[in-house]
Image (tube, grey):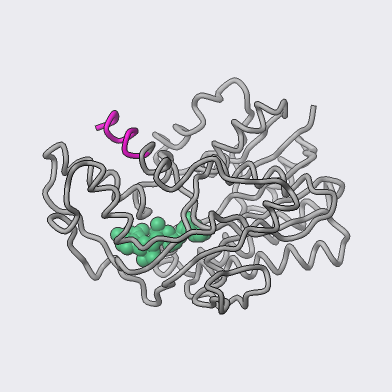
């Protein structure tokens, strides 16, 4: 039985990845950071209660990571722990750099010392590209990285550390550069779930307006269910390397609003307002990823269209509210 260790196991991706690995017959272990309010921290993995083992730990606490790795001796390590909100990273830049950058260094050091035969996956992000776009309108592995947020800067640091540890110490360490990926389990302060939840509340008469930030930015949105499958394919490729995971299509935040409100029989223009507090000091305007390599070489393809994903999210909020 293969053993997988997942940091950030209680997040959106951690929960889908755990389900996938349990289905594949893995023994799954995960690390959870203690919050002062313990309620709701593990709701995404509650269905897996008896099938996975979790430990308290923190990527900023070298000792905690080392202790867990010694106990588990994993075959695969998935680093999904991060301060994941780009806008919040402007408010806590130092914490973001520490967690998303130096935290990865802590994990790589423990991995090299304790279980160097394991394989390692790093959750890299399209936010690393910033506003660089190739002339054909896509971002790919060769696109220059010009991050536009503390979050993006930290992810570039971690990306380079993973490349460096792979080259210097011959570790099986890979980066998956994932473009935005969503689901009903997405946090409600990310734009897809914020719009879907807000529109459902409006439909049910619980509110009259929804305030957003930049409606013109475009994102390449896929489903987390599909993207965690890519993580598993990436870590199991014979040769460690970097990959792009994306849908290859993009839409603006305005398109997202139009689709969601229309689905509910409403016109978004009657309800959406703009509030400066949701704007970022520097905006990343456009993301569209070229994932042709992972499709061709690892036979990965998404099962969800943008529409099917949003429909699932609307359905989930219609039942919840
Ligand atoms: O914003 C715009 C906002 O916060 C998407 C993370 O998973 O993907 C995610 O980062 C777009 C941006 O995601 C609101 O300005 C407008 O242009 O859903 P988001 P993100 O910043 O793209 C990358 C790949 C990651 O790695 C990250 O971890 O929507 N937008 N109005 C808004 N965004 C939010 N959150 N709230 C608004 O009211």
- The front one of 307 and 28 is 307
Residue 72: give x, y in percent of width and height: 76, 35
Give the residues in magenta: 313-321
Q: Quadrant of residue 196?
A: top left
Residue 84 seen anywhere in this rendered image of the structure? no
Residue 308: give x, y in percent of width and height: 42, 40
Residue extending farthest to the top is 50
Magenta stretch: residue 317 in it?
yes
In this rendering, position of residue 146 left or right of residue 28: left
- The front one of 39 and 321 is 321
Q: Quadrant of residue 165?
A: bottom right
Q: Quadrant of the N terminus?
A: top right
Q: Residue at x 53, y 69 (%)?
A: 152
In this rendering, position of residue 223 left or right of residue 196: right
In this rendering, position of residue 269 left or right of residue 173: left
- The front one of 321 and 80 is 321
Above or below, comparing residue 139 to residue 242 in the picture: below
Above or below, comparing residue 227 to residue 88 in the picture: above
Q: Residue at x 76, y 66 (%)?
A: 163
């Amino acid at each position: 039985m293969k053993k997988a260790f997942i940091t950030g196991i209680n997040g959106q991706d951690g929960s889908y990845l755990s389900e996938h690995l349990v289905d594949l017959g893995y023994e799954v272990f995960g690390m959870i950071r203690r919050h002062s309010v313990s309620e709701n921290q593990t709701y995404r993995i509650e269905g897996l209660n008896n099938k996975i083992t979790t430990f308290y730990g923190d990527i900023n606490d070298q000792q905690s990571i080392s202790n867990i790795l010694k106990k588990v001796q994993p075959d695969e390590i998935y680093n999904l722990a991060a301060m994941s909100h780009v806008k919040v990273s402007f408010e806590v830049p130092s914490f973001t750099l520490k967690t998303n950058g130096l935290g990865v260094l802590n994990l790589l050091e423990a991995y090299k010392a304790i279980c160097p035969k394991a394989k390692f996956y790093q959750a890299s992000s399209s936010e690393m590209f910033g506003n660089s776009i190739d002339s054909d309108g896509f971002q790919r592995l060769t696109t220059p990285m010009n991050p536009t947020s503390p979050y993006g800067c930290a992810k570039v640091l971690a990306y380079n550390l993973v490349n460096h540890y792979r080259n210097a110490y011959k570790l099986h360490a890979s980066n998956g550069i994932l473009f935005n990926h969503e689901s009903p389990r997405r946090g409600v302060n990310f734009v897809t779930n914020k719009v879907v939840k807000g529109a459902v509340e409006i439909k049910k008469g619980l509110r009259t307006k929804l305030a957003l930030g930049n409606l013109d930015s475009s994102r390449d949105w896929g489903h987390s269910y599909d993207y965690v499958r890519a993580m598993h394919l990436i870590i199991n490729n014979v040769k460690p390397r970097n990959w792009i995971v994306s849908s290859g299509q993009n839409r603006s935040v305005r398109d997202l609003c139009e689709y969601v409100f229309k689905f509910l029989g409403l016109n978004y223009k009657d309800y959406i307002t703009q509030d400066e507090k949701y704007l970022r000091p520097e905006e990343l305007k456009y993301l569209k990823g070229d994932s042709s390599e992972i499709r061709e070489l690892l036979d990965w393809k998404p099962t969800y269209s943008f529409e099917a994903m949003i429909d699932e999210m609307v359905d989930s909020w219609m039942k919840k509210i």
